[in-house]
Amino acid sequence: MCRVGNFAAAIVFGFAAAACAEDAAFKGDPYSLNVCPTSDEELGSMGEPIVYSHEGRDIKFCCDGCPPRFKGDVAKGLAKIDALMIADQKPHYVLTSDIVTGEALPADGQIIDVVHFNRLVRLGSQKSAQAFMKDPGTYIAKLNDAVIAAQKDHYPIDKCIVSGEKLTGTEDTQGVFANRFVKFCCADCVDIFVQSPAKYLSMLEKGEAPAAGSGPHKHHEEHE
């Protein structure tokens, strides 16, 4: 599997295609796991997580003792992260076809799972994987479009997952993270979301949202 990453969040405003038309526009998904890849401890259980960028890829650890252990065997650490991200994102993957060729994906055991900038992409062959890596931004844009098309009409809540403010449907900010479609009341909430995506994605899957004005956000006060 391919292990390529980037520190910044993959934010797709509107309906994705224009924002990710070029590879440079896809800045990578934030670290979306809730565990430290070295200790397996829950992030936040030992204080503020340590953010580490490996070749631009966003990784979080539970404490400052874990990054050195990760650096001691980077290949092992990345393989573990990739496996966890594949397990997390695969149930949400919306495509049954190869994003490069358009052909149906083979049986699950033959699918090539690529983790690119913390995003899972499922491909049908090594040839497709090679083509994807030559122009990943274009294919990520197509994947984002597919995620939005598949998930937007079944969005489980009518409030911003961060602020709890009512989603208006007209001025909402939209994003694709870890193969999930997420709606926000404003860009400020995106900035907060990417600091703890696992927390908010878990809330989204449960159909939960904070009470309006109770989130870690000045949105409510700013719009009084």
Image (cartoon, helix red, strand yellow):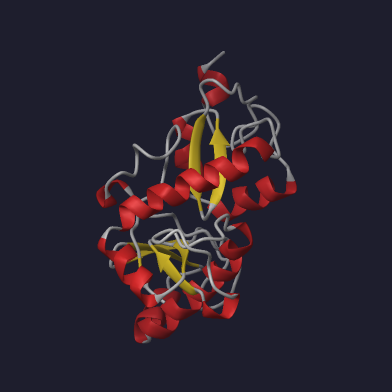
Most distant residue in the front direction: 103
What residue is at 45 percent from the left and 35 percent from the top? 15
Quick check: 175 left or right of 206?
left
Quick check: 154 left or right of 89?
right
Quick check: 39 left or right of 23?
right
What residue is at 38 percent from the left and 83 percent from the top? 75
Q: Count the labels in the image.
A: 0
Q: Is residue 69 visible?
A: yes
Q: Is residue 139 above or below residue 145?
A: below
Q: Position of residue 184 (x, y in %)?
A: 54, 33
Most distant residue in the top direction: 224
Q: Position of residue 179 (x, y in %)?
A: 53, 54
Of 172 and 135, the residue lying toward us: 135
Rendered-image quadrant of the C terminus: top right
Of 187 and 48, the residue lying toward us: 187
Q: Is residue 79 above or below residue 134?
A: below
Q: Is residue 29 above or below residue 150?
A: below
What residue is at 61 percent from the left and 43 percent from the top? 151
Rendered-image quadrant of the N terminus: bottom left
Q: Position of residue 122 (x, y in %)?
A: 48, 66
Of 15 and 174, the residue lying toward us: 15
Q: Is residue 45 visible?
A: no
Q: Position of residue 193 (x, y in %)?
A: 52, 44
